[in-house]
Image (cartoon, helix red, strand yellow):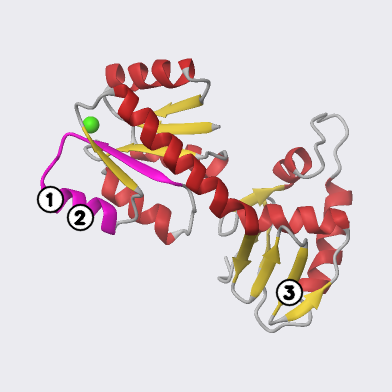
Amino acid sequence: MKILVIEDEHKVAEALKEGLEHESYAVDIAHTGEDGFFLLNSKQYNLLLLDLMLPGRDGIEILKTIRDKKLDIPVLILTARDTVEDRVLGLDSGADDYLVKPFAFPELLARIRVLLKRGKEKQTSRLQLADLEMDLIKRKVKRSGKDIALTLREFDLLEYLLRNQNQIVSREMLAADVWKETNRATPIDNLIDVHIARMRRKIDDPFETKLLHTVRGVGFIFSEDTP
Ligand code: CA
């Protein structure tokens, strides 16, 4: 389980990292909203611990951007602010939970466990973008209510794109995460492009709204909006 901590106070961030690593979580730290956002876009996390008072973009702005981009990560706010208005603002902006500093570490751990469990349940059964739906249990894909038959590899590829929807996915990411090809000496870009083209014929060509877009020189983005 991987946790991202966005916290500008170095001492607090280090203490969190140490405590969480002791509980066997993998932890990355970002000291600014910008760094945090970069990490969120480039790596997969199971949970975000977000401080509200940050230099530059504050926590609420980061949270709103995350939810606007439909990133489905559970967010736990950690903050010294403890007025009712602040709590409401945090939760309204898309936080899943709220903890006021100073807090007891066991309480933080308990809340993290709840959020991770909830996130897991939510993650497993269904993925969707626009009228395209994927049932992960039955391993079925439908678009506009019509069944689409995919090969095993196409299914995995589509699942990855759905999980990372509205974010740019590079061929390198696909090679590592879908093909599990970590050896950079054997580029499989052509293989990826062939699978992408075949999948596109099935999930996009018969439909008016295109979801899979090529971003020249970078990779692909799975989105309702044309980049
Ligand atoms: Ca702070």
Amino acid identity at mark 1? Val
> Judging from the image, what secondary structure is the residue with disc 3 in?
strand
User: Could you say where residue 118 lies in the image, as x and y percent from the top left?
Assistant: 48, 48
Q: How busy is the neighbourhood of tag 1: few (under 14 within 10 Å), some, or many (20 plus)?
A: few
Q: CA distance from mark 3 to mark 2?
A: 38 Å
User: Could you say where residue 125 lies in the image, as x and y percent from the top left?
Assistant: 64, 58
Evaluate if marks 3 and 1 touch, with contact meaning CB atoms under 8 Å apart: no
The residue where tag 2 is placed is: 88
Which quadrant, please, contains the C terminus?
Answer: bottom right
| Figure quadrant, ligand 1 | top left
Tally of numbered discs: 3
Q: Which residues are magenta?
A: 74-92
User: Of the residues under marks 3 and 2, which one precedes in the sequence?
Assistant: 2
Q: CA distance from mark 2 to mark 1?
A: 6 Å
Q: Quadrant of residue 149?
A: bottom right
Q: Residue at x 32, y 45 (%)?
A: 97
Q: In the rendered structure, does residue 202 fall within the stretch colored magenta? A: no
Q: Residue at x 78, y 61 (%)?
A: 139
Evaluate if marks 2 and 1 touch, with contact meaning CB atoms under 8 Å apart: yes
The residue where tag 1 is placed is: 84
- Left or right: residue 47 compared with residue 122: left
Amino acid identity at mark 3? Lys
The residue where tag 3 is placed is: 142
- Left or right: residue 21 compared with residue 190: left
- Left or right: residue 49 compared with residue 101: right
Q: Residue at x 56, y 40 (%)?
A: 42
